[in-house]
Every structure is written in structure tokens, then in C-alpha cells.
Amino acid sequence: MKKLLVILMVLALLTGCNGGDKPTKEKVVTIQVPSDVISMDTQIATDGGSFSAQDMCMAGLMSLDENNLPVCDLAESYTVDETGTVYTFKIRENANWSNGTPITAYDFVYAWKRVVNPDFASEYNWFLETANIVGASCYDPDSGYTVDDLGIVALDAKTVQITLTKPSGFFLSMLAFPTLFPLNEEFVEAQGDQYALTVDNMIYSGPWVMSAWEANYSYEFTINDKYWDYANFKTDKTPDKIVFRVVNDTQTALLEYESGSLDTVNLSGEQVEANKDVDGFINRLSGYLFYLLININKTVGPTDMVNVNARKAMSYAIDREAIATVLNDGSVAAEGIIPFNLANNPETGVDFRVDNGPVVEYNEAKAKEYYDLAVAELGHDITINLIYSTDQGDPEIKAAEQIQYFLEKVGFTVVLNGKPKNTRLMMQRATLEGGKAEFDVSLTRWGPDYGDPQTYMDLFTSWQSTGGYNSTVYDDLVLHAEAATTDAITRWNDFLAAEKVLIVDDAAVVPVFQAGGAMLINPKIKGIRFHVAAVDSYRYIVFAD
């Protein structure tokens, strides 16, 4: 009997081990990010982290392939008329929202009119004007346009037509940017001011759905079985879940990577040298250009930064190579406001940065000369309130400290004023909107939305400049460039000249460094797409062979 009982127990154990009731271990990939998502509303977000999160679970007419080229996503096909200004897109019949509702042309019309509606006041309303869409300047009450003039119409439920003011070589790439993704009007309006604040207040058009979001800790995505390409997207190598963990301390993050809790980690400082031979190490140059945004907005009360000699003193004072060395994360010294590897000369193929050469220079003696001139003109020494983000990890904190060191060497007094990124952005926004000037200089960054110099040049036009820069010479060069749609080399030369006016003549902003991307990526995963001229995409992550 005892032998029989033992045999039965063994059989029971074997049945349990091999039976169908055993839970399968979830396949999870965990990505380190330095800060939380600021907004999941595609028309409110302005930061790269939020855009990358939106790219996971939202989709547009087009997406970018691994070579940064636009390919059809929600659009099945498109045609362009002989003028190059009228695009007609057929939306896939099987394109559905995550709740099963069909994605229609009306969803694009609603979304695009929402972003330019002056009552909504999206900070990215200018994006449609940059895309050369007819009537896009309706967000400006002085434009003479209304939202109903916007050049987008639904010809039927699955056909959307878009009309441009002039041909654009980068229009299709812009359609892969979250600002131009569709929104379901019935759902969004039903959520009201709660839309996109939690995972329960969103529906999704992309390959993943946001399944959890714990503020300042993590946000998670699971596969979207309603995505039009689900059959090809979901394979045995696709993770069951992709988790983004907020870890802004690089040492903590590295320890978690080494313990297996993280599958990617951003490296800085000594970590780069210590891990450069580790399997999974990569060092890439991103498109993010860090610069000093100078508050010269006279409408909120003049600051010392209105003085051009003070600004030139700042530019000459900063040793950008030294800052890149201190960061030691693959970052390089900025040579202008346009980063390396963004765009090439249409005739020679030479990179813009190489074509225009360095338009900034480190020269301590010149910096002191300009500082003395500024002090003589202002009648007092200069104190700078420098704001910067404290929740983005080492690069911004270290860079701010280095900037303080170099500026104080030539006579400035620099007060470091670290703020959470969202607070810093709000302080800059208040100045743009004519509010109280709460800073003199901000260490900020811009990542290109598309691969063309215009994505940077537009930032500093008089009608958009957050710092209040206003130059007729600069504006005219940018406008002339943007009008030269059929003369690519004239357009290129205008942008070359505009950068020199902005940086050399006026020192309206001070480029500092182009961000690097030293990382460790678990060799067991692949598929992350790093785009210099767009947001990084994690939606294609799979397990390696």
C-alpha cells in the first residue's frame, strides 16, 4: 500500500508539472527612463519622453522605418497630385481603436482641428503650419483663418485629403509624429478634462496599449490585439509586456541592470569607461541639442540679458569640449544650434554642421572683454538666475555646474536654480505668454521633429521664440528659406546664414552640447529604433534569437 501511495503521489506530481494548469512565466522587457511621462495627450506633450511613450500605443498615417524613412502605418496607400500639394490617404479597412471602434478620416480631421484651435492652446499648434497645411495659422487670431479653413477634409470614412500651401519634402515624415495622430472625438469629448490622465481615460491606435501608469515610478504596455498589423506584430519573440521604469540616479540604474531588473540603462561619467567593453554597450549621438535659452523678452521687463555683449560674453566663456569630457556619455561639444547628422546639403551631401562650420568659440579673453563692455553699458555687475532640470539625471546637473564655473571665471555671478523638468518648462512658457520673467537663462534642449534645419530655425523666429528674440534679419532669412520650396540650395544657404545671425551676430541662444547616448542594452533584446530626427521608438522590441 505504501509503495502504491508513493507511485500515485509521483504520478500526481508529474501530472502537475506537465499539465495545462501551470502558469507560463510572463516575458517582460524593462526600459530605464530618467523621468516620468509628462502628458499622454498627443497634443499637449512637448517632451521626448512623452512622445516615445505615445509612439508605443498611438499610430499615425505614417511611421518611420529603421532608416528613418516614412512608411505607411494606418494609411494603406496615398496619392499626391501634380502640384505636390494635395495628398489623399486611404485608411486601412482593418484599422481600429483598441475598443474596437473603426479609425476613420473624421478622427484625423477632429484631432488636427483640435490642435490648432486657439481655445485649446496647444504648444504644438505651430507644427501644422510648419507642415505647410492650408489655414494652419488659424491658432493666431490675427491670421484671418478659422479652424474650418484648415486644409484637411474627410472625403469618406476611410479617405482623408490634406492640402498644403506649397510642396514639402519632409511632410510625410511629419505624419509619423504624435501631434498629427488621430483622436476619437466621441471618446475624447466624453472624458472631458480627464482625457489621457490615466490608462482608463485613453483608447489606442498603435501596437500596444498602456496597461499601467504609476506616477514617477513606472508605466507599462501590453500588446494591442486590435492593431491593424497584430497578426504580424505579435510573434513568439514579442514581449508580453514592456515596462518603462523611472530611475534618474545612474548608479542605482546600473546596479538594477546588473541584477537583471532593467534591460537598458543610460550611462554617464566613469560608468562609460568601466562598461565600454561589456556586451550590450552602445554609444550613439542623439539629435538632442542642449543650449542656453536666454530671456530677452522685453514685454515682461528687461533683464541684463537684453544686452548683446552680455550674451556674447556667455557664449565665448563656455568651454564646450570640457563639458563634453565631464559628461563622458558620448555627448559632443555643440558647434552651432543645428546638431550633427540632421540634414545634408542637397547638392554636395555635406552635413549641415560641417557645411557651416563651428559658429561658436571658446575664448576666455574675448569673454572677459565682452563682459566688461556689458558691465560698462549696464552700470553694474551681472547676476544670472540659471534654471535647469534636476530630474533628468546627471547630464543636465553636471552641465549646469560646469556652465556656472566657466561663467563665473569671466565675472558673472551665477545662481543655480534646479527645478523639475515640468516646472522649468512652465517657467519658460510663462515668459512666452507674457507672464512674469522668473529666469534669466535656462539650460534646455530641443530634439528634432523631422530631418531638416527648419525644425530648429523655427524655434527662434519672433512669432515663436520663448526667450523673446526678435530679429527682422533672422526672420526674413527663415521666411525666404521656407518659401524656396523649389530651390533647395537657396533654402539651404538661407538656413546657413540664419544660423550665423542667430549665434554669431546676436548670440540670442548659446549652444552647449549635443547629447550622447552611452547605454547598456541586454543582448537578449533587439529592435529599439534610435532616430536622430524623430522620437526614439521602442514599439518594435523583440527578443533576440
Image (cartoon, rainbow, N blue to C red):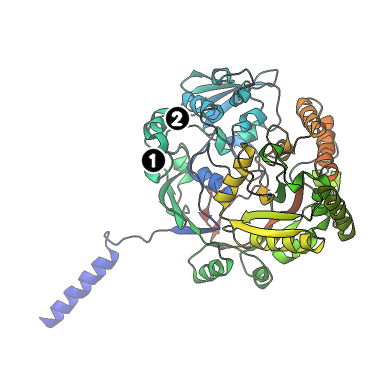
Looking at this view, name the residue that lies furthest to the bottom. Answer: 2
Q: Residue sitting at 58 percent across and 17 percent down?
A: 149
Which amino acid type corresponds to the residue marked 2 in the rendered image?
Answer: Ile
Q: Give the structural element (helix, strand or loop) at label 2.
A: loop
Q: Residue sitting at 63 percent across and 41 percent down?
A: 431
Looking at this view, name the residue that lies furthest to the left. Answer: 1
Question: Can residue 166 be seen at all in this image of the molecule?
Answer: yes
Quarter in which the N terminus is drawn: bottom left
The residue carrying pointer 1 sits among few (fewer than 14), some (14 to 19) or many (20 or more) residues within 10 Å by Cα, namely some
Q: Is residue 74 left or right of residue 353?
A: left
Say above or below: 88 vs 302: above
Residue 329: x and y, percent?
A: 68, 63
Which amino acid type corresponds to the residue marked 1 in the rendered image?
Answer: Asn
Q: Answer with mark 1 or mark 2, whichever residue precedes in sequence.
A: 2
| Residue carrying label 2 | 103
Cα–Cα gap, marks 1 and 2: 18 Å
The residue carrying pointer 2 sits among few (fewer than 14), some (14 to 19) or many (20 or more) residues within 10 Å by Cα, namely many
Disc number at residue 450? none
Residue 123: x and y, percent?
A: 58, 36
Say above or below: 491 vs 150: below
Q: Disc 1 vs disc 2: which is toward the camera?
A: 1
| Residue carrying label 1 | 201
Front-most of residues 379 and 161? 379
The quarter holding residue 478 reads: top right
Front-most of residues 442 and 93? 442
